[in-house]
Amino acid sequence: MWGRSSSGSSFHPGVCMNARVGAGYRRELRSTIPNSSSGPGNRAIGSSQFVWKGCRMGHVEVGATARAAIEAAFEYVDDYRHVPDWMFGVKHFTPLGAQTSGVGARFDTALNLGPTTLHLQGEVVEWARDAVVTLRVRKGIEGTLRFTFQPLDAEATRIDAVVDYKVPGGLAGLALDRVLRAFIGPAVRHTERNLRERIEFDYAARKDCGS
């Protein structure tokens, strides 16, 4: 989802986990992560954390343009076999059952966070071909990962990713939150660059093979 073209992300306070900042909420941190891509129109990659009823909630957005047709970009992201190749820290991404795409597909994965490994299970809760894929994490931590796709022309696709997560309270939750904060910057930079490059390489290979 991300070549040569412009890329970036935006920060939106108050939308973390669909929450409104108000009674019971405390915004704990707003940070910006330098974007590794260069070019006109690039923005800093932003992340935010909130505290609500003892739980820490985070929100990250990042987006870029890949030089690939929307069908090719979507198919690459939707193919679970590619996920460990482009998503930072993912050791494996294994289907739980015969279904591997579309609403209801479930996956088991392990995320290497450096000092610890986070074991997660997620389910696709939103899926529309060449438009959107949303994965909801239900085990390990709570959260969602949502990809949206927009064609810019016949061979360029805008892809945006939004991550929302919630870490439980208590000492264990606080320790995990600190690890996640340190992980987010490198993870976003790596994923933005690597996924974009892999989509474009895969698309070029398809064209060379005439598929």
Image (cartoon, rainbow, N blue to C red):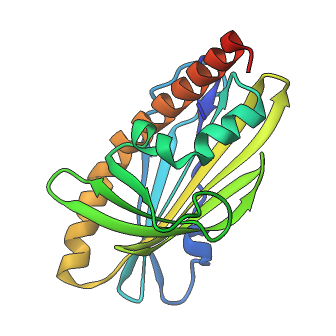
Rendered image quadrant of residue 101: bottom right
Outermost residue toward the top? 208
Residue at 41% x, 36% y is 85
192 shown above or below 136? above
Task: Using the image, determine if residue 74 lies above or below residue 72.
Answer: below
As drawn, is 155 to the left or to the right of 175?
A: right
Pick the quarter of the image with the N terminus: top right
Q: Position of residue 40 (x, y in %)?
A: 65, 20
Residue at image location 46% in from the left, 67% down from the top:
96
Q: In the image shown, does 3 or 121 lie closer to the viewer?
A: 121
Tell me which corner region of the image, top left, top right, bottom left or bottom right, holds residue 14: bottom right
Q: How many callouts does the rendering have?
A: 0
**Can residue 50 be seen here?**
no
Residue 154 can be seen, yes or no: yes
Q: Is residue 50 left or right of residue 18?
A: left
Q: Quadrant of the C terminus?
A: top right
Say whether residue 189 is left or right of residue 161: left
| Residue ID at (27%, 51%) | 182
Would residue 182 appear left or right of 8 to someone viewing this image? left
- The picture places residue 163, in percent across and down from the top left corner, at 52, 58
Which residue is at the far left? 115
Locate residue 186: give its quadrant: top left
Residue positioned 18% across, 50% down in the render: 114
